[in-house]
Amino acid sequence: MNRFAPYVFLRDLASRWDVLAFIVVIGLIAFLGETSRGLFAPLSQLEITPLSLDPRHLPEYAARTTFRMLAGLALSLVFTLTYATWAAKSERAGKLLVPILDILQSVPILGFISITVVFFMSLAPGRVLGAEFAAIFAIFTSQAWNMAFSFYQSLRTVPLELIEASESFRLSPWMRFWQLEVPFAMPALIWNMMMSMSGGWFFVVASESISVGHTTVSLPGVGSYIALAIQQKNLSAIGWAIATMLIVILLYDQLLFRPLVAWVDRFRVEQEPGVRVPDSWALTMMRRSRVIQAASVAFHAAVLWTSRVVKRTDEPVAAPTPPKRSLDLLWVSLMIAAVVLGLWHIAWVVIKNTPLREALEVCGLATLTMLRVFILIALASLVWVPIGVWVGMRPRAAQIVQPIAQFMAAFPANLLFPIAVYGIVAWKLNPDIFLSPLMILGTQWYILFNVIAGASAIPAEMRYVAANFRVTGWLWWRKVALPAVLPFYVTGAITASGGSWNAAIVAELATWGNTQVEARGLGSYIAEATSAGDFHRIVLGIGTMSLFVVVINRLFWRPLYYYAERKYRLT
Amino acid sequence: MGGAMNDSPLLQCNDVRKAFPKPDGAELLVLEGMNLELREGQIVGLLGRSGSGKSTLLRLIAGLSEPTAGHLRYMGRPISGPAPGIAMVFQSFALFPWLTVFENVALGLEAQRMPRADIRKRSLAAIDLIGLDGFESAYPRELSGGMRQRVGFARALVVHPNILLMDEPFSALDVLTAETLRTDFLDLWAEGRMPIKGVILVTHNIEEAVLMCDRVLVFGSNPGRILSEIKVSLPQPRNRLDPSFRELVERIYVEMTARPLGGPSARQERFPGLGIGSVYPRVSSNLLAGLMEAVAAAPFNGKADLPEIASDLQMEIDELFPVAETLQMLRFAELEGGDLKLTEDGLAFAHAEVDERKRIFTRHLLNYVPLAAHIRRVLDERASHSARKSRFIDELEDFMNEEAADQTLRAVVSWGRYAEAFAYDDENAMFSLENPT
């Protein structure tokens, strides 16, 4: 996002690139769905591996789930390094690729599953492999977009002098990518990978226990285990699942992310000495281990070796070549073709099969969900902003709270279904209201994370001034704390809002055994269409949700973000 | 290395011109009529204030960008892209924070695909030469600014360049460190221990230029061009207190404050910047008052020699010149022959109390800054006594680019606020006559 353009959001709202991107993405989804419907028949006999609720199987399930998530992460990394690089390096491609990424980000994750599952399973008919592809792809869609965005941002903000230095010492583009651009982007990328892992857990049930129309697959894993426990109303199994998740999250946090975060600290460009260096016992161990030492030396040598092997093009790096007329023409005609195709598919799939009444109804449902998201964000803010400020001012407390919040962010809403369904049925509560908290279950923590970060960034001098002039109570909140954390809060609230829309599909339709509780909204509409396998309604629902998310972002969150950045960012 | 002269120059620039396209299709001229020659054994200084295009010229020579017109030749061959024999030292060091000292130095050789053993040998030699031995495995963040710039030098020298380009390499360092590094560099140069044949040094520090260079090219701004060339034939090592050294510094000050020829009249010549199209630097009223007070006080008593007052106030020319020129533009002082002389009103201002100062300042602001007078007139004429910022920005952009317009308006806003000539609300981007209650 361009921080220095506060007044461009009106233009932003409807840039033709966005419209184009929207059409292309939704058109592609409609196309995939349409194609895969033709491949529907042979899959109906797919065999299902029986699952067991015996906790002794949990280590194996946990291992398989973790493997899927890491495979998804690896795919996301590959996607990030290629897509984002292309978008950043080619001005022509970037104009379309960036809005496409923005739209993809707003397409609900479960939407991808319902559309693509049949396609993936047709890749390896009759085998679990196809289902594994589908699950890994689903996890990939919950991880990739924010990583790609972060990498793109980093590529665009590499310090000019470092670029000039690498040009002046005549690094080849390949070498420059691995020696300058990737290292520079690393800290932000690692942080986003951690966020992505949490996001992946939230949808683990939906991605492993896939149920679209007549296609039902349960891949062995923690997600399917939870799904089965819900189906069989087995509370103790739910407990085991929670314990397993806790252990797995703890393990990869300690073994993977902690070391990465500590290691990546050296890639920060701000070279201020004396800043707290994150530490990790695992990294220390690895650094001191001879075997791993040798491995890392070998790896480094390999990276250098590739820069020797990859052919060096000695074309002058200076001054971008003027855009070629014929290429532009080709590009434009490609775009036009994409728009026509996209429009065609959208028209074919949705409009032909959708009476106006249904379209209006879907918009009404979306408005209901929107209302829910806004009210929940407001409520969560009331709770977490004061707590976050309190915690952020106390480094000790922050150290304790951060990992807990990180775990909570990964906590799938399905695990709370028993409580929600029991409560609503027992006390005859209104599900429209009392199912809503599930939507914000995983996403409210982003508000807390960011407010803690903001509060801990308040300069000590500012706090001393407040204390010195005895600014306390409400005045202190109004004039000191709230303005100081506002830019951070807005960032968190944007993430939380996007996540809550996504979660609506899981949260608006809760099941426990045979009992089903439903809240009226776009989420339950899509969930029902998915289980019915009605892909016209799936596309309509997903398209509407993406549209709502994009418009709300452009009309509400982005202007708010620019405003907060401009007025309240402490630099 | 000093005396070795050779017939073909290392570097030649002929009629080089550089312009950047503006969004509206017009172009912003930053360099014009650049002619420059670097011969073996020379250090040539490019001296000027920020915005005079000296760094742009250096980047053209480095092959980091291309000239709009004109020719650049390195050892007789046209420069297109970074040439193997030209290396650069950067103002902010530009080290890769994730590489150790050794890896940073070796990077340029890696890019050339030199055999591993040679890379090691040459990198260690360069590290040794520049006084970094023992620091090979340190990361840049562990080093002080001076040590970091030594890495910058080692990295440039290791590729054995014929020409070393230096972009204000000492300006990010404290005074003492910078002096040590300069002396070390000059020693290595005099002893011929560096594998380089010629140096181009960009600087805005006059004394640094006189201390290090054989020739100094003085740059002027808007557009960037060479005002004059000054030969420094003092023997090395040079002494800053030497009268002939001082004389040269003084002479360059005079060059840099001299106005270009061909103005409308002598009077306007001395007080440039008429009309709404003038670009103003952002100089705070505190600095203006501070300089007037300093010049008015003993030992200057109203007339100060620029090099003297610069060292007295510990200001670099980049900081001092805009203040002095703003005083001249407001007719609180006159700049002549390297001297800054307060006018009658300037003296009166320096000796006045707060309220009287504001009255004097308001009078001068509205009389001599057409933009301020224009804003005031618009506000007076309107019934609402308010006007949008965009209105004035639009008018300014007829004369200058967006950035300059913004800077100019901000400068005038800050003077207008001090003078209480008008009020400005940044939140709503509105000018008004009343101050907030």
Image: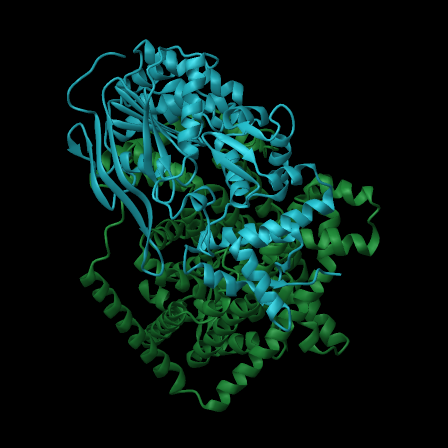
Chain colours: A green, B cyan
Q: Nearer the viewer, residue B244 or A35?
A: B244
Task: Kindly indicate the quadrant of the structure image that contains residue A182.
Answer: top left
Q: Residue at x 79, y 52 (%)?
A: A476
- The x, y position of residue B382, in whole percent, is 61, 71
Which percent across, then down, holds residue B434? 69, 63
Q: Is residue B235 above or below residue B375?
A: above
Residue A135, position as x, y percentages in the image: 44, 60
Say if residue A560 shows up in the picture.
no
Residue at screen point 61% across, 33% down:
A276
Residue A178 in percent (x, y) is at: 35, 39
Q: Is residue B30 left or right of residue B9?
A: right
Number of numbered discs: 0
Above or below, comparing residue A273 to residue A182 in the picture: above
* Residue A333, quarter of the rendered image: bottom left
Please indicate whether residue B277 sits to the left or right of residue B424 in the image.
left
Q: Nearer the viewer, residue B161 or B24?
A: B24
Residue under the point 43% across and 59% down: B397
* Residue B410 seen from this side: yes
**Which corner quadrant of the image does residue A395 belong to?**
top right
Classify residue B78 as left or right of residue A124.
Answer: left
- Observer-nearest residue: B58 or A52? B58
Q: Quadrant of the C terminus of chain A?
A: top right
